[in-house]
Amino acid sequence: MNIRHAGVFVVIWGSLFIGLLLSLIKLPAEADIFSPNYVVCVLLYWVIVVPEKVNVGIGWLTGLFFDFLLGATLGIHAAAFAFMSWIVACQFKNIRYYSLIQKTIVVGAVNCLGQFLLFWVEHIFGVVTVDYQVFWSCLSTVLLWPLVYLVLTLIYEAVSPKSALELYDY
């Protein structure tokens, strides 16, 4: 593994770790319903940009870490993250060339599907709480996505400029 690949490896796992930590931070009660899903933003970014390095398995592993950190039933978030990664990975060749607004819409739709999957799996396990405030979280995730996309693109370009230029190859 050369220096460039090691740098990309550190950036991917470091950003996923930061996303996990940010997702654990609790906001005040009034603002907590608007808390975006940081780790999903970061995970979907990497699935779109480097699908050969970040794929369904990494999505599942990240979800498993998230379940462990939250103390949730193991596998619930792992299944949802793997499902969201799979949807994006199946279409990454198309999504990669979408405009930022189109990518934002795709990430928002995939995040909502993931939230519905979480709701459904929790319903199967009998720990369901009907909470329509999840939609506010989806909306804030959509609003956060362009910022996450731009920041991670700048970081990725700094670490691996040759690969980052391929993102804009039309």
Image (cartoon, rainbow, N blue to C red):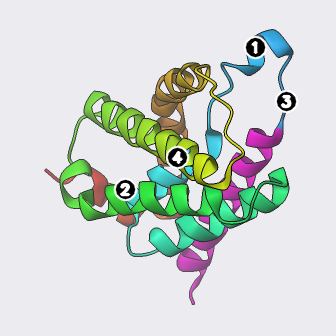
* Mark 4 vs 2: CB contact within 8 A: no
* Mark 1 vs 4: CB contact within 8 A: no
Q: Is residue 69 above or below residue 9?
A: above
The answer to whether residue 54 is seen in the rendering is no
Which labelled disc corresponds to residue 26? 3
Instruction: Tell which circle, 1 or 4, labels the residue nearer the N-terminal end.
Output: 1
> Pointer 3: residues within 10 angstroms few (<14), some, or many (20+)?
few
* Mark 3 vs 4: CB contact within 8 A: no
What is the distance, in whole Å, between disc 3 and disc 1 at their CAs?
A: 9 Å
Q: Is residue 67 above or below residue 132?
A: below
| Tag nearer the camera, 2 or 3 | 3
Magenta stretch: dominant secondary structure: helix
Residue at the disc numbered 1:
31
Image position, residue 24 (x, y; %): 81, 42
Which labelled disc corresponds to residue 120? 4
> Pointer 4: residues within 10 angstroms few (<14), some, or many (20+)?
some
User: Looking at the image, which residue is at 68% across and 26% down?
Assistant: 35
Task: Look at label 1 and name its amino acid.
Answer: Ala
Task: Look at label 2 and name its amino acid.
Answer: Ile
Task: Look at label 4 and name its amino acid.
Answer: Trp
* Mark 2 vs 3: CB contact within 8 A: no
Q: Report helix, strand or loop for mark 2.
A: helix
Is residue 7 part of the magenta span, yes or no? yes
User: Looking at the image, which residue is at 83% across and 56% down?
Assistant: 69
Residue at the disc numbered 2:
48
What is the distance, in whole Å, between disc 2 and disc 1 at their CAs?
A: 29 Å
> Pointer 2: residues within 10 angstroms few (<14), some, or many (20+)?
many
Quarter of the figure with residue 66:
bottom right
